[in-house]
Every structure is written in C-alpha cells, then in structure tokens.
Image (cartoon, coloured by chain):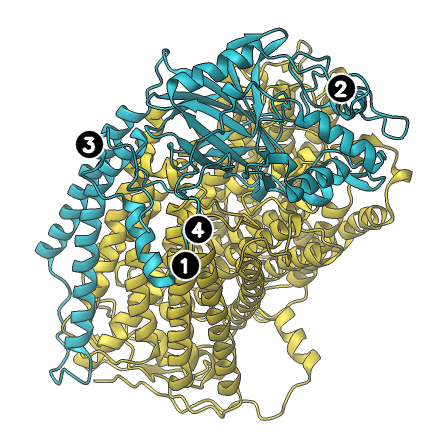
Chain colours: A yellow, B cyan
C-alpha cells in the first residue's frame, strides 16, 4: 500500500557550518523550505513567549486580589500575549510556515513564484516581531490597550507603545500580503504540468483560499492601525468624537479584518488536518470538491460577519440581524469540513500515530468551539456574554485547543519530511495529553465564569463572587499543565534533532508529491519529473495503480534562484524605519501636548528620528541592489501555466490588497460624509489643481504603457525615455500635491475638522502610493540603464507598470469623492 | 448551593424552568465544593430579559447537545472501528457520497434558519425601548460610573449617584449609556445584556428584575489600568421604596454641618482646598445643594448613604457602615492617595506623592491625617433621610445576607 518513490537519500553535507554561515545563509536564502523553517521557528518562539505571558496572566488570576501583575502591566501582558499568538504564531505558522515549505513541494515545483519577495517577506515578518519585542522589553513600552486597540483608548495619553504596535502590525501586514500574493501567483502559475487546480492537494487549496482572504480583508487592520498611528503622530482623526468623528468606525475597520483573520488562522490548518486524515486513514478525502467549495464558501461569508463582534455596541438592528444570519451560515461550511474529515476516516485503516491524535483532538475540541460559536452568534445571548470569559473560552477553544492542535498535528506529520527525523511517539503522546487535559482545565471553567458574569481582561476580582475563585484556580492549574506540555514538546523536538537522519522519503505512506522528495528535501526539491496525468488529488496512489513512474533528472541541470543580500537589506532598512517611525517622527508631536520644538524631544525620540532618516538610504541601497541582481545567475527558461509572467501575476494579486485598503478607508469616509459627520471646511482644495494633476497622472499611465510596448518590441532607447517621462510626470504630480497639502494645512486645522482629516489620510495615503509606485518605476529604469534588461530579461517593468496604473485609477476615485463631491 | 430558589414566588412562570447558569454553577460546585457568595448569573430568571433568552436558549441548547453527542459519537465510533488495531480490511478507496453531503448541508442550514428566527423573535421582544420606561443614564469614565435620573430634576441638574444604581423592580428600565473618555461596557448580568458606553454616542436598551436585591455590575470593555476595578451595584427596590428614594433625593440638600464640628472643617477642605492642597474636592465632584458642582469625578451627593467606595474598591456592608474600623481606614486611604489604592485612578494624591495623568507625572497636594479624617467625616454626613436609605434590608443576591448589615 505504501507508495515509496525513493531516490537514494541525498548525501547531507558532512562538514559542520559555523553559526554565522548558517545565519547568513538564512538571511540571503531564496529557498522556500528555509524560509518556511524560518517562519515556523520564529512562530514557535512567539508561541513560547506568548505562552509564558499567558501563564503570567493565569498566575495573577489564580486567586482573588493577587499582586503579581496589577493594572497596566497586566493589560500590557494580555495585549502582547494576544498580538504574539495571533500575528506571530497562528497566522504565520500555518499560512507562511507550512505554506512556504509544503506548497511548492505539493505542487511539484522547485520554488514559489517570486523567491526574493519571499525572502523579503519573511524578514519583514521577523522585523515586525523584533519591533513588538523591542516595544515590550524596552522600559515597559508595550501598550495596555488589548490587541484590539479600541479607540480612543489607543490615543489615551497614559498609554505608551501604541505607535510601535501600529507600525509592527503594518509591517507584518505588508510581509503577509507579499507572501499571500506570492502563494496565489505560485498556485495559478506554477503547478507541475498536468496538475489542474481541481487536482491540487487540499492543503494547497487551503493556502490559496487563505491567501485570497488575507489579500481581500487585511486592509481593515491596516486602515485601523494607520489612522490610529496618524492620530498619534500628526493629529488627524476619523474617529475623534470631539470633532465629529465616530469611534465605532475604528471597530468596524478593525473587525473587517480581524474576523476574517480567524479564518486566515484556521483554513491552512484545516488543510493540514485533511492531509493527515487522508494519509493516516489511507483513503481519499471524503468529498474533495465539497471541501474545496466549503473553504471558498468560508472565504466569502467570513468577509460579511465582522459586525458580530460589535452587537453590544448598538448598531442598527437590521444590520445586527443581517450579520447574525451570515455568522450562523458560516457554521454550515465549517460543519461540512468536520463531517467530511470524519467521513475521510470512515472505512480506512487508521494509523494511530501522534498526528492522528492531534487531528481527533482537534475535531472534538473544535466541535465544542463551533457550537459555542453559534451560541455567540445568537444576538440576545451575545449581548450577555460578549466581552465576558465565555468569549475568552470560546476563542481559545477554536484557536488554542482547536486550530493550534492542528499546528501541532502539522509539526508531527511533517517533521520527518522537514528534518529527516522522527519525533518520539511516546513523548508526543505526553505532549498531546498534557495539552488536551491542560486546555480543558484552563478553558472549560472559563465558559462557566462567563455565565457567572466575569468580564474578560480583568487583572483582579474580589473574593465574594459565587464560584469565581474556584473556577479561576482550576483554570490556572490548567495553564500550568499546558506549560508542562509545551516544555515536553520543545524537549521532543530537541531530542529528535540530536538523532541521525533516518526517515525515508515517505514515512507515513502519503499520496501527495512532497513525499517523493528526500527527507529533508534537497535544495532543488525533486531529482525527477512527474508524470503529467493527475486522475485525482492523490497522484502517488493513482500512479501506482496505473504503473506510471517518475523520470529521473540530473540535479546538475537544475537551476535555482541565486541567493541575494538585497531583500534582507531592504527588510532590515524597514526595521530601522519601523523603529524610527515608532519611537521618533519627523516632528515632535504628541497628542497630549501638541506640536513642540524638536529640540525639546527626549533622547530616545531624537535617536529614533535620526534612525528614521538614516533608514531611507539603506532602504534604497537594499532595494536597488535587489533590483540590480538577476534572479537566476544563468539564463533560465521559466515555465508558467498562464501567459503572464510571475511578476505580473504576483502584482495582480497584491493589487487586490491595495484595492481592499482604499475601499475600507473610502467606505469609512463616505459613511462619515453621508451621515453628516464630515463636512468640508469653507476653504477646500481647488478642483482645478486636481484636474491638472489628473491630466498629468493619466498621461503618465499612457506613457508607461507605451514604454512597456517599446520594451516588448525592442526599442530600448524609447523605452528608457518613456520611463524617464513617467518619473518626471509623477514628480510634478507630487510637487503640486505637496503645495496643495501645505496650503490646505495652513488654511484650516485638520485637528478640528473630520473632513480635512479624512482628506489628509486618504489623499495622503494615495500620495504615499505615488512615491511607492515611483520607486517601482525607478527600478526598471535603473535596470535598463545598467544593462540588466534585454529581450529575455524584463526586469520589473511589468509589475511596476501595473502598479502605476493602479495608483492612477485610485486617483480618479479620489478626485470624485474629495474634489468633485 | 442553588441560591436562586428563594426568588419571588409570585412569578410562577419563572419556576418551571431550570436556569442555565445555575445548572452550570452546580456542576462547578460539585467539582470544586465552593462556598456561596454573591450570585452573578445570566441565568437569573427574575429578569425578563434573561427569561426570554432562556426560552430561546433552550432550543439552541437542545440542538447543540444533539449535534455534540451525535458528531462526537460518530467521531469516536469511526476512530474505534477503523483504527489499525481493530480493522484488518483494506481501506476503502471511495471519494465521497453526494447524497450524504447534501443531507449534511441541508440539516445545518435548517438549524441555522431556525436559530435565526428564534434570535430575531427574542430581539423583537427584548430590544424595543418604550417611551414610558423609567430612564436612567449611565455615564462611564475611567474608572467609575455615574447614574442619573433625567426625570428627577433638581436645581442645576438632575439626581445622580456615583457607582450605585437604584432601580425599581417589576418594570423595564431604559438605560442610556455614554462615556466621557474611552469605550466602556455596562453589564449587570442578573438584569440583562450589556451595552458599550461610547464617547459621543448614547445607546439605550432595557434591563430589569422582578426580585428586590443588590446586584453586581461591571465594566466589560478594557478601559485602562483599573478596568477590573470599575464595578457598580444595582440596587433593585420595591416601587414604593424607589419612589421614596427619588422623592427624597429630589428634595435633598446636603446637610449643613454644625459650627466647629469635624464635618464643618471637612466641608471647608472639600469646597476650598487648603494651602498645601489647592485642588479642592469640589473642583471635580458634585454635592447636590452645595456649590460643589464638579463633573470630572463621580457624584458624591449621597456618599454617606452609599456603601461602596472607589467603584467597588471597598464595600462597607456591615451595620457599622463607614464607622467600621476597616471601612474607615479604607476611606482614609482613598482620600489620601487614591492612585495608590486603585491603579490608574485619576483622583489627585493628597499625600504629596506623584500620580499619572495624561501621560505625565503630576504632584498631588498634601493633607494632614486630621484634615483627611475631617473630609471623611463630611462625606459620611452626606446622607439621605433614613426612609430613603436604599440599602436597608435589601438582600445581596445569592448570599442570604442583608446589604446594610444587621445590628
């Protein structure tokens, strides 16, 4: 039964490399497997850190009126705990850790569509984590506002460190969007010949769906973080009720992303669960197509349920009901996933190893979490328990002892593939049962605490409330059990790494293509080509039946993208920039004190501001170095499935996220305008200048299009000239806009007018996009000027041009809603 | 341990159903053997809101149990039957079953429709706010509550009380929440659902109870250092006692202290401050019938009647009230350095220390222990007439104890 396509295990490098060599390798690598490992490793680190903070929280709450973590420090701990677990563990581990490692392997290709963007994304992710950690551990700078950073708590002058988190969220988001666009482009453009979308392994579908969801919805979080950040640094505000803003709008922005984020966390792991079920039961998936439709259904519906986090805010009832129905409907595809996983196990011969236990544990726990989720969807009940420990128990039920169980399952399932070693089954069972019992002890009492009226995010509680003390105490014991489980897990990984590589290519008898590579896979993944017939999503099973075999390929003939410093340096510059933006700024503005002279700023503020300026040349150095280095050291014929190259494909997907971002912000503005909150001041920016700018920008779009054609047709001088004119037109546009902004800023005070704030935020964000797009156009110009482009090397002209068109289209919309309206 | 069984027998419709949370609490009791305390529970059937919610919830709970038992039985049966050790047959290579899939989509859809109808029906019953309802406004600030009664007008404002909400039983109360700083959340589970208190907006909804008693309320929206210390009490009174309270509160003017008494010295400090403590209490607090009309802090008009201090930092529930030694010590400490007692409290310190406000450390004033005790004496004197003492004889929900204590 077990299908073993095993080329002889690759000779592993014998000599031990120095520490620096290894680190340098990971800084420069374009290997999706190393990048995946980096994500997984960092995610596990964040999980450990977040877990320790959780234990701190539980120790404080073990008994009434403890003094271990009191007041704001407690709030800081819960904020960092949540941020780490959501943005630095669950999302990156599944989507980007396992996704990077296994998506190309399962698709039978040698890398993702844009390997260097991938390097940049992972280091941007690490940079955002470093910012959070730096914020937390430098003088207690972490915010105590919760990961939800509700307005106006987020701009409360007693809070510190909110800016760091906003910057970290935005950087994390950029990395995440680049990664998602990369996956989507990989899936559309780079499957092994013969594998249609409908024959992809279910995990690939999960990654595809999650990437699309991430691209569609992340704009919500970015908008919320950006507006909060700008209010802290400049004083513009869409939310300030004192000038007619609406605080709830921030919650709308936030949850527009942060509910779909739940599915961004869940879906990749559901894919892993399905892989485990199929392999361990030695069976095809039950209802593969229905499962794919369920995933896509979840993606669509999850975008219209966010308001259920805000029922108790008191939005109009008709909205509440509409969102409630959507919320309950999500239960249908989610239920289908659970039923089909059980159906997959049905009739099999189930191998009862640790991955199977994690899967079964997930199914059982998630069932409870799903049911309590439906209860929360029912509005009258939600009015009672929202913001209580019932909600805390619910989301830990679906995230911690639901989703994270499949993260563990994924680790146990793919560990032999990733490391060539096995995790100990015996220690693994200890890990599983400690986590299972620990989770139940920790969180089931919290359901009851919620029903007994304990609100969430309380650092203390009085002794006199019925059963609170006992339930909290049990919950704390559970957290300690989880801690023990975590230590056992880390030990399991450690002891495994001490052992020699013994795993064959296909230790579980899996059916998907990753099991044809050696364990761990060689840098080029496969020393063979695959047959091109894919009757089902289980090629290895089908090929064994049909007798088709792999065709060996000489590894020497395989070319991989070359390592490069460019992406890392660029990401590092963004870390410096992020630090500068967090702790410094271009002016010395503080919401409580207003604008002061720069000389009066603190030493840290000055240092950070200097760093901000310094980061800009480093950024350009890294970016141009990146653009000036070819992806492959030798000319390589790319194979892609569509007629579009990977750059175009990646940028097309990325643009989806830009559309999402502007859509969220503009929707917020339109709401403020229609509801009468935002009224333009008497003196508003002149339409004639906007019209002039429109002419400039639209012509630049035609120019760059013409330039692209020229390049295509081999007229290189005209091509270079076209790019130059585009850049000049962009610069003129920016000069006019800076003039207009300065004038408008003098005429009236944006801190007193919501319309003006919206104008500066949205038009300013568009201006930033002009700058980004301009840099984007400068890159192919640089490539062309340094002879990096020819008939076969298109450099980055295609994505740059596409992006420039986007910026142009957004401008037309802005003219309509800010200048014409 | 079921502490709800002594509820008003007059409401027969409530006795038929077994409250959800009491069941849960009994389970917890069996597990942990805990002692009785103040019972906070959304299963409290004395509230018509909770009653409606249970009517809705019973269907949901029933369906949930069926689904839970069915699916988990299916899961464990499958695993047991088909695990390697128990199943020597070759795995069956089938790809699904469309008919079964259809059923598995259809049934959850039906359940979803049913639950939606139930929820909407319940919303239609509990949400509409009647113009005839008694209106109470709940103002939330870091980290306390003010409850005011728009219909009870007095010179220069309306009747207001800090952190203690007095309501009549057996009628629906329309609570309007708002906030003067960050977002807070109003929640008294025994009386109904919660509402966010949002700056710049007013939200009105219904709460109520059939049973007299003292109920716990809490802030539910993370609002800063002392989010956990933003408690309030809801005191539900029979209609006649509530009417008395309102009547006396409207008529109330703060008692004038006797000349030369500690109360008089305290009043002077309260109203004007001292040379070393220029920030007088009156700048932030209101006392009805005196020049003190501050709005930065909670209303202190009836402080002598109140039994909670600093939004639940201390509860003086014994018969000795603020004269009990520990209660007096807490009151003293509160006036002296509230930010030390309660993290993030925005009330200035009067021990010369620094406290945080608007991101800056601010040096407080200084009052001697004697001056603090004088202020405490003045505060204790701010009492409603005995007939309007809303605590007297009212049981704390679930404890069997009387809030005012017994002599």
Residue under label 4, please give it.
Answer: A392
Of A755 and B360, the residue lying toward us: B360
Residue under label 1, please give it.
Answer: A443
- Marks 1 & 3 on one chain: no
Q: Are marks 4 and 3 in contact (CB under 8 Å)?
A: no
At horizontal 50% and vertical 60% (from top left) the residue drawn is A92
Which secondary structure lies at badge 4? Answer: helix
Mark 2 vs mark 4: which is more N-terminal?
Answer: 4
- Marks 2 & 4 on one chain: yes
Q: In which chain is the residue bearing label 1?
A: A
Q: In which chain is the residue bearing label 2?
A: A
User: Could you tell me residue B51's position as x and y percent?
Assistant: 27, 34
Residue under label 3, please give it.
Answer: B13
Q: In which chain is the residue bearing label 3?
A: B
Q: In which chain is the residue bearing label 4?
A: A
> Exactly how many numbered labels are in the figure?
4
Number of the front mark, 2 or 3: 3
Residue extending farthest to the top is B155
At horizontal 40% and vertical 51% (from top left) the residue drawn is B36
The alpha-carbon separation of the residues under discs 2 and 4 comes to 49 Å
Left or right position of B10 against B337: left
Q: Are marks 4 and 1 in contact (CB under 8 Å)?
A: yes
Residue under label 2, please give it.
Answer: A743
Mark 1 surroundings: few (<14), some (14-19) or many (≥20) residues within 10 A: many
Left or right position of A31 against B90: right
């Amino acid at each position: 039964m077990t299908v073993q396509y095993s080329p002889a295990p690759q000779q592993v490098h014998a000599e031990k490399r120095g520490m620096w060599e290894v680190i340098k390798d990971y800084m420069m690598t374009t290997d999706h497997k190393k990048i995946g490992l980096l994500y997984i490793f960092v995610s596990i680190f964040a999980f450990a850190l977040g877990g320790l903070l959780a234990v701190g929280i539980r120790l404080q709450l073990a008994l009434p009126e403890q003094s271990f973590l009191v007041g704001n420090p407690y709030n800081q701990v819960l904020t960092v705990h949540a941020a780490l677990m959501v943005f630095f563990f669950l999302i990156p581990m599944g989507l980007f850790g396992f996704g990077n490692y296994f998506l190309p392997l399962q698709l039978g290709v040698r890398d993702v569509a844009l390997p260097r963007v991938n390097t940049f994304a992972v280091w941007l992710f690490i940079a955002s984590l470093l910012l959070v950690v730096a914020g937390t551990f430098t003088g207690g700078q972490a915010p105590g506002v919760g990961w939800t950073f509700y307005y106006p708590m987020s701009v409360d002058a007693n809070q510190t460190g909110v800016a760091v988190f906003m910057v970290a969220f935005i950087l994390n988001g950029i990395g995440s969007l680049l990664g998602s666009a990369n996956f989507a482009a990989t899936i559309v453009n780079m499957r092994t010949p013969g594998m249609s979308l409908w024959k992809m392994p279910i995990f690939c579908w999960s990654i595809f769906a999650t990437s699309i969801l991430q691209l569609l919805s992340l704009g919500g979080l970015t908008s919320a973080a950006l507006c909060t950040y700008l209010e802290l640094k400049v004083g513009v505000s869409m939310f300030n009720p004192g000038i007619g803003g609406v605080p709830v709008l921030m919650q709308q922005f936030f949850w527009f992303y942060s509910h779909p984020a739940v599915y961004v966390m869940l879906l990749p792991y559901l894919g892993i669960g399905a892989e485990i079920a199929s392999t361990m039961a030695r069976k095809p998936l039950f209802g593969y197509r229905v499962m794919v439709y369920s995933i896509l259904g979840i993606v669509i519906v999850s975008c219209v349920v966010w308001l259920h986090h805000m029922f108790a805010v008191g939005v109009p009832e008709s909205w509440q009901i509409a969102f409630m129905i959507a919320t309950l409907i999500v239960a249908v595809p989610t239920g289908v996933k659970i039923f089909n996983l059980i159906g997959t196990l049905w009739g099999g011969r189930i191998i009862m190893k640790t991955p199977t236990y994690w899967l079964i544990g997930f199914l059982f726990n998630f069932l409870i979490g799903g049911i309590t989720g439906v209860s929360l969807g029912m509005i009258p009940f939600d009015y009672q328990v929202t913001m209580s420990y019932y909600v805390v128990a619910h989301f830990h039920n679906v995230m911690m002892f639901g989703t994270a169980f499949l993260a563990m399952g994924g680790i146990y399932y793919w560990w032999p593939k990733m490391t060539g070693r096995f995790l100990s089954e015996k220690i693994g069972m200890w890990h599983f049962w400690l986590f299972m019992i620990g989770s139940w002890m920790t969180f089931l009492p919290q359901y009851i605490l919620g029903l007994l009226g304990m609100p969430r995010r309380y650092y203390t509680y009085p002794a006199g409330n019925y059963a609170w003390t006992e339930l909290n105490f049990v919950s704390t014991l559970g957290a300690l059990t989880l801690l023990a489980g975590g230590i056992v897990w880390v030990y399991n990984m450690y002891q495994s790494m001490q052992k020699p590589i013994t795993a064959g290519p296909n230790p579980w008898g899996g059916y998907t293509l990753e099991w044809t590579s050696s364990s761990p896979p060689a840098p080029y993944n496969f020393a063979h080509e695959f047959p091109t017939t894919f009757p089902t999503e289980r090629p290895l099973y089908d090929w064994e039946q049909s007798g088709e075999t792999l065709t060996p390929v000489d590894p020497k003939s395989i070319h991989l993208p070359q390592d490069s410093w460019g992406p890392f340096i660029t990401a590092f510059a963004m870390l410096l920039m992020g630090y500068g933006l967090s702790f410094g700024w271009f002016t010395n503005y503080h919401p409580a004190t207003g604008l002061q002279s720069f000389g009066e700023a603190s030493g840290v503020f000055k240092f950070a501001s200097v760093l901000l300026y310094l980061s800009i040349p480093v950024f350009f150095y890294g970016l141009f170095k990146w653009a000036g280095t070819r992806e492959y050291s030798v000319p390589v014929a790319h194979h892609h499935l569509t007629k579009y190259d990977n750059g175009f494909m990646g940028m097309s997907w990325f643009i989806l996220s830009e559309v999402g971002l502007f859509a969220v912000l503009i929707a917020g503005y339109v709401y403020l305008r229609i509801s009468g909150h935002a009224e333009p001041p008497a003196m508003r920016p002149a339409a004639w200048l906007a019209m002039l700018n429109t002419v400039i920008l639209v012509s630049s779009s035609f120019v760059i299009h013409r330039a692209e054609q020229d390049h295509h047709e081999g007229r290189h001088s005209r091509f270079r000239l076209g790019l130059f004119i585009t850049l000049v037109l962009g610069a003129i546009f920016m000069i006019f806009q800076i003039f207009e902004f300065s004038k408008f800023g003098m005429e009236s005070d944006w801190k007193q007018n919501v319309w003006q704030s919206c104008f500066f935020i949205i038009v300013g964000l568009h201006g930033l996009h002009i700058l980004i797009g301009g840099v984007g156009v400068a890159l192919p110009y640089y490539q062309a000027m340094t002879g990096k482009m020819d008939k076969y090397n298109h450099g980055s002209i295609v994505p740059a041009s596409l992006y420039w068109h986007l910026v142009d289209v957004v401008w037309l919309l802005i003219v309509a809603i800010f200048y014409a309206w | 341990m079921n502490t709800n069984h002594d509820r008003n027998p007059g409401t027969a419709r409530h006795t038929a159903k077994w409250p959800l949370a009491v069941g849960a609490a009994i389970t917890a009791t069996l597990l942990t053997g805990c002692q009785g305390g103040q019972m906070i529970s959304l299963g409290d059937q004395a509230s018509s809101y909770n009653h409606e919610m249970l009517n809705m919830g019973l269907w949901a709970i029933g369906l949930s149990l069926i689904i839970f038992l069915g699916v988990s039985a299916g899961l464990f049966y499958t695993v047991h039957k088909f695990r390697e050790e128990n199943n020597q047959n070759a795995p069956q290579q089938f790809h699904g079953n469309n008919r079964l899939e259809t059923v598995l989509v259809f049934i959850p859809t039906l359940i979803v429709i049913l639950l939606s109808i139930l929820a909407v029906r319940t919303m239609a019953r509990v949400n509409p706010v009647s113009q005839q309802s008694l209106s109470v406004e709940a103002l939330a600030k870091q980290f306390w509550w003010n409850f005011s009664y728009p219909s009870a007008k007095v010179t220069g404002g309306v009747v207001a009380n800090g952190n203690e909400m007095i309501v009549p039983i057996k009628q629906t109360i329309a609570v309007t929440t708002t906030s003067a700083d960050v977002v807070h959340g109003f929640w008294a589970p025994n009386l109904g659902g919660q509402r966010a208190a949002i700056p710049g907006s007013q939200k009105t909804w219904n709460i109520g109870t059939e049973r007299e008693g003292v109920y716990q309320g809490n802030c539910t929206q993370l609002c800063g250092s002392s989010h956990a210390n933003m408690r309030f009490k809801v005191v539900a009174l029979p209609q006649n006692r509530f009417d008395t309270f309102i009547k006396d509160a409207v008529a109330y003017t703060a008692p004038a202290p006797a000349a030369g008494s500690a109360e008089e010295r305290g009043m002077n400090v309260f109203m004007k401050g001292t040379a070393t403590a220029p920030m007088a209490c009156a700048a932030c607090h209101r006392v009805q019938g005196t020049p003190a009309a501050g709005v930065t802090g909670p209303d202190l008009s009836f402080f002598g009647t109140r039994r909670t201090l600093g939004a639940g930092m201390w509860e003086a529930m014994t018969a000795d009230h603020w004269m009990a030694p520990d209660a007096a010590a807490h009151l003293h400490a509160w006036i002296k350095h509230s930010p030390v007692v309660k993290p993030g409290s925005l009330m200035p310190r009067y021990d010369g220390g620094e406290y945080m406000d608007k991101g800056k450390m601010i040096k407080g004033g200084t009052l001697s222990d004697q001056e603090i005790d004088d202020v405490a004496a003045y505060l204790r004197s701010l009492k409603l007439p005995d007939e309007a003492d809303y605590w007297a004889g009212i049981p704390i929900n679930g404890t069997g104890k009387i809030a005012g204590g017994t002599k």
